[in-house]
Structure formats: structure tokens, C-alpha cells
Amino acid sequence: MRALEPTDLDTLYRWENDTALWIVSDTPAPYSREALWRYLEQDTGDIYSQRQLRLMITLAQDGTPIGTVDFINFDPLNNRAELGLFIASEQRGNGFGRQALELLTAYAREHIGLRQLYVYIALDNEVCLKLFEDYGYRQVGILQSWVKRGSSYHDVALMQMIL
């Protein structure tokens, strides 16, 4: 994992504007290159001042970006953050999600000082649910009709890990 770089603009533009991902990212519209550029320019990498932190997940051997991790809704008083994990579709099924969870959990504990991480996962996203369950996240609740897709609403699991 590494900090975002200006050279990530094209990769982020492609990923953020993939409409197939909008159902899990709560994105209602495409991002412009300019908006993403401003985001990159303004990103300080300081989770305490911005209350969020996005890191790029890269392959160790050549630095190729394969996904992102987001710590959002950071609460320094209670030492917790919501987690977002994205692995590019062409890289899924290779164990990178599990490896990223290991790295980001260690980072959250050792460098940010977090006590807990939590995620919201749609109940029909069985692969993602299994990944987080296998890693040790516990389902602590079901939020009914939490996300809207088209004209219907879907339930979401709230999952938590105490570090």
C-alpha cells in the first residue's frame, strides 16, 4: 500500500467511473478528471485533519495499482473508522483482498492507532461477506432496505473487527 500519487489520475478516473461499481460505492454520477485532480492535489494523507485516508494497493514486484483502501468516517475520539476495500476486477480471485486486509489492519492498528474497523456489505455480495468473515469480522447487525438499486432496496450487513 502506498499514498496516492498524481500519476494515479487515469487509474482512479477509470475505476471511479466504472458504473458497475456504483452499487457498492454510493456513487450517483461520474467524476470528472478535474474533480479527481483536485482531490489528488488536496489530499494531505493526514487522516486526523481530513477524517479519511485513501491508499493505493499495488503489486509488490512492480508497483502496478490493483485497488484502493479507504479509511472513512474516521473517529479519533473512539479510535474507529469505516473501511472501504476495492480490488480491480481483473485482479480478483488471486488472494489480493485477503493480503490487503492483512496490511491495512496492521497499518490501522500500528500507525493510526485504531481500535476498530467496520464495513457495510450488501447481503447479496456473498464473496465480499465471506472475505471479511474469514478474516475475522463479525456481523453485528442487518440494516434493512439500506441501499437502493434501481427502484428496489436491499439489506446490508454491518460487520466489525475489534483490533
Image: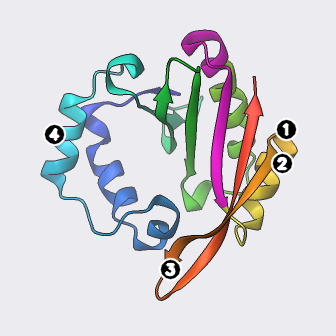
Which-is-in-front pick, marks 3 and 4? 3
Q: Position of residue 1 (x, y in %)?
A: 53, 28
Q: Residues within 10 Å of mark 3 (few under 14, many from 20)?
A: few
Q: Which residue has dot 3 on it? A: 149
Which-is-in-front pick, marks 3 and 2? 3
| Label at residue 136 | 1
Q: Earlier in the sequence, mark 4 or mark 2?
A: 4
Q: CA distance from mark 3 to mark 1?
A: 28 Å
For residue 93, above or below residue 114:
below
Asked which secondary structure carries label 4, the reply is helix
Q: Earlier in the sequence, mark 4 or mark 1?
A: 4
- 151 vs 70, nearest the viewer: 151
Kindly identify the residue that appears in the image at 18 percent across and 53 percent down: 33
| Label at residue 74 | none
Amino acid tagged 2: Glu
Which-is-in-front pick, marks 4 and 1? 1
Kindly identify the residue that appears in the image at 50 percent across and 76 percent down: 148
Q: Which residue has dot 4 on it? A: 38
- 101 vs 156, nearest the viewer: 156
Q: Position of residue 31 (x, y in %)?
A: 24, 59
- 53 vs 60, nearest the viewer: 53
Kindly identify the residue that appears in the image at 64 percent across and 10 percent down: 110
Asked which secondary structure carries label 2, the reply is helix
Amino acid tagged 4: Arg
